Image: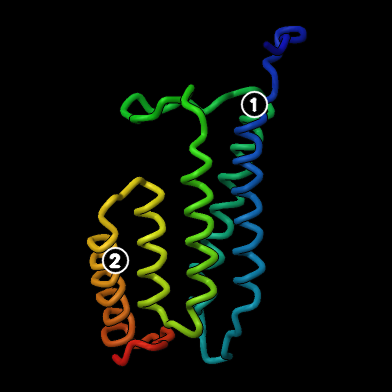
Amino acid sequence: MEQQIQGRRPVAWGDLLVALGVVGLGAYFLQGAYRIRVLPSYSNIGPRFFPFLVAFALLACGAVLCVQALRGVRGIPEEAEDVDADAPTDWRALLVMGGALVVNLLLMRRGGFIVASTALYLGVALAFHERNWLRAVLIGAALSTAIYLAFTELLGLTLPAGIVPL
């Protein structure tokens, strides 16, 4: 256990890492907001407004969290969380989900959104010890297809079609 020096609480290192992650995410959003091209026809609120709003909100939250962590204030776990803090890390699940993400990235261009997302869903289901592979594939395919159609037909966005002829 860390010793307290002259009434000071030790730095909450885990909380500080999370806070720095929030600051980093805010900085990433900020540089992304600056890269948005704005036409001169926008008078007051243009396409940069909300990205800047989110970026500054993340930076402000991250700064407050950093100060709190440096003061030794730790995040209090939610009572309703169903988490055993003393349980060991399930490395198998992390590796399977990481592998599913890599497969998703590799399949996205050639296989398309539906195939890649179905593979991702299957990988996450397997990481959570799903035994019925066929059910996981069918649910993943149904969700991926619904999302693909919603984004391409309703919102007019372009997602990689790949080998599924929709």
Task: Name the side, left or right, on which 83 lies relative to 49.
Answer: left
Residue appearing at x 42%, y 82% in the figure? 112
At label 1, the amino acid type is Ala
Percent across and percent down for residue 1 are 67, 11
Judging from the image, what secondary structure is the residue with disc 2 in? Answer: helix
Q: Residues within 10 Å of mark 2 (few under 14, many from 20)?
A: some
Nearest to the observer: residue 98 or residue 17? 98
Residue appearing at x 35%, y 77% in the figure? 114
Q: Is residue 12 above or below residue 120?
A: above
Instruction: Answer with the quarter of the image where residue 158 lies.
Output: bottom left
Q: Which residue matches tag 1?
A: 12
Q: Which residue matches tag 2?
A: 137
Judging from the image, what secondary structure is the residue with disc 1 in? Answer: loop
At label 2, the amino acid type is Val
The C terminus appears in which quarter of the rendering?
bottom left
Residue appearing at x 56%, y 45% in the figure? 61
Instruction: Answer with the quarter of the image where residue 7 lies.
Output: top right
Q: Residues within 10 Å of mark 1 (few under 14, many from 20)?
A: some
Task: Name the side, left or right, on which 125 lies relative to 142.
Answer: right
Q: Earlier in the sequence, mark 1 or mark 2?
A: 1
Q: How many marks?
A: 2
In the image, farthest residue toward the right? 5
Q: Is residue 126 above or below residue 52?
A: above
